[in-house]
Amino acid sequence: VSSALKCGRGELAAQLLQGMPADTPKHLVLLRHAAARGDLPEVMRIFGALRASGAELAPSIWNSTLDACVECRDLRRAEQLMEEMQGNRVADVVSYNTLIKAHLRQDNVPRARSLMETMKKSGCTPNSVTYNELIHSLVQGHNDSRRAQVWQVVDEMKREGVRPNRVTCSILLKSLKAKSPPADVQRTMELTEAMDEPLDEVLLSSIVEACVRVGKPQVLAQKLHELEHAHSISITGVHTYGSLIKAYGYVKNIKGAWRCWKEMRSQHLTPTSITIGCMVEAVVMNGDVDGGHELVAGLLEDELCKHQVNAVVFGSVLKGYSRARRMERVWSVFEDMLTRGIQPSVVTFNAVIDGCARNHQMHRVQGLLEHMSTLGMQPNLITFSTMIKGWCSCGGDFSAALATLEALRKTPGLKPDEIVYNTLLDGCAQVGLVSEGERLYKEMQDEGIAPSCYTLSVLVRLLGQARLQDRAFELVSVACSRHRLRPNAALYAALVQTAVHGKDLARAVSVYDQAAWERCVPDGKACAMLVRALLATGSHAKAVSILRSTLGLNRQQNRKFEPRDSYGSGNSSAAGIDDTFISEVICSILAGAASGVGGALAASLLADAKAARPRLRLDAGLERKVTLAVAAAAAH
């Protein structure tokens, strides 16, 4: 039959099919074999020959032909076939799902939705496959309005009596990113907990990887604790072990990471390079760089594992020794890697160069660049950025940093980015090169690179050191307007500090109030600096008001301290204010303010601070002073 179709002998193929027994599996094999080769014309010839033979076509024949049209990206023919199937009343749930998937591939959600309505009217109920395809398409979109529809679809799914399954949860988990809204993270986790199907190792891997991506160590630690006491999951895949090891390393539970590693090895599973990389990284990142190196050395002696140890695995050890400021070990491990014939990558060289930058050994970088050249490798943007960082921090050799910038510009295919310029500007701030910093900022804009809030905060710091606070505020105003930037907490902190250094407390308070209004409170260091400056000038009430705002209290608006949600990010500004500073403020109020006002301010602040921090520890003598001050005010 296949040969007859290839030769264009459709009549002969029809006669052969007519003579064959009505064997649907064999017909399906012919159709799928042609579809797998992407030969849609042959699929349609086989389908046409089957119809011409007069045999009754099973729904699976129709659906396989429809699926072939979709897989071969012939949507027009798929639509025509679907109309015919509807006319012959052979379209079923599989048919509709196949065509819905095709339209979702084309990002045509409205048409997919329309097909779902047609599906319902024809008596076919959308199932979990239908909804999962729709959810998968929505989470892939970069449009916020599209992503907002995801939970509407999940709710609709529940209303229609279709329970979210492991696939639904896996799609939602894989869509979570570092900047995902806390509400999305919480709802996704709740959905996995409420799922009827038992947890399998694929979904388990998706859960822990999602928790790592969104940066929720507390949630992850809780999930891992629950999994340790759930004995129903049998793990047999090295990928799942890799995910768990990475997760345990992330929450700094190195015992859990080692337990997973030993369990995997006890099952005689050969770890992949990725799993090995996760384990070495977990050991190194938890402070045991020597342990990570010993693990690598042991694997290199294992005949089954030694070929899985690559430059990425060695890179984790190199980074660990670099951060520990043990450069002699960095060079030793690097030489050992080369001796064993493991080919270094550009990333490997970047790790060693970063070690030189961190440990003031920039004089050895040229040798590394020459080694890269002999291997036919070209430095990338990270290489140049790391070198610039090293020259800026290595005694402030700014001329070498600028020479590296010029070398970057001359390298084909590379050009400076925001990170490079930020590093240079930070170097200017370290050595007080105001004019050079402004020149670089102008170059940055001329090259079409938009500044970030970090860029502006560095410039504010640089100009503030030179007592050019008016210029700093003007620069921020112009940049935010031109590039539609919204200041973040770090930029507000830099502006507050600059204004305080310039003894312009009115401007500092104005900036802080604006930040508080936008719920973008500067960090604890900037807040403490402003509060101390206000106390020194006798502005006790305003100092207390700012401290209240930083701690998340505001009596005037009848708002009480609320503990952060388990899926939220918490108040980082309040975390920067310790108990000692609160004691310092209360002491200053009692010492500097009029007795009646001072006692009331101190008592109010003390009461609210205790409400915000149940574990607040203050000197008992200080609390007695506050009580006596309040009593004295009442007596007067």
Image (cartoon, helix red, strand yellow):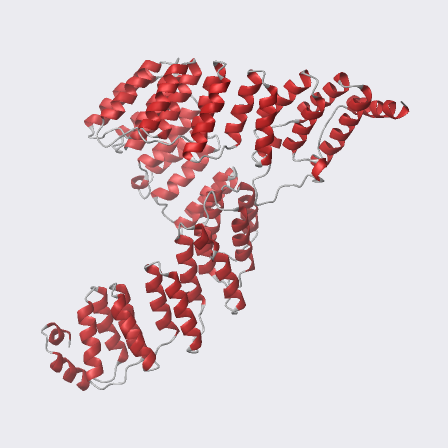
User: Is residue 264 depicted above or below 489 in this figure?
Assistant: below
Taking the spot 47% from the left edge, 57% from the top edge, the residue there is 149
Taking the spot 69% from the left edge, 35% from the top edge, the residue there is 554
Asked if one can make out residue 457 in the rendered structure from this viewpoint, the answer is: yes
- Figure disc tally: 0
User: Is residue 236 depicted above or below 196 in this figure?
Assistant: above
Q: Nearer the viewer, residue 211 or 381?
A: 381
* Quarter-of-image position of residue 376: top left
Residue 15 percent coordinates (x, y): 14, 84
**In which quadrant is the C terminus drawn?**
top right
Specify whether 264 is left or right of 494: left
Residue 39 percent coordinates (x, y): 19, 66
Specify whether 351 is left or right of 19: right
* Quarter-of-image position of residue 443: top left
User: Is residue 533 depicted above or below 137 in this figure?
Assistant: above
**In which quadrant is the N terminus drawn?**
bottom left
Asked if one can make out residue 330 in the rendered structure from this viewpoint, the answer is: no
Q: Nearer the viewer, residue 427 or 542?
A: 542
Residue 224 percent coordinates (x, y): 53, 47
Residue 297 percent coordinates (x, y): 36, 33
* Quarter-of-image position of residue 328: top left
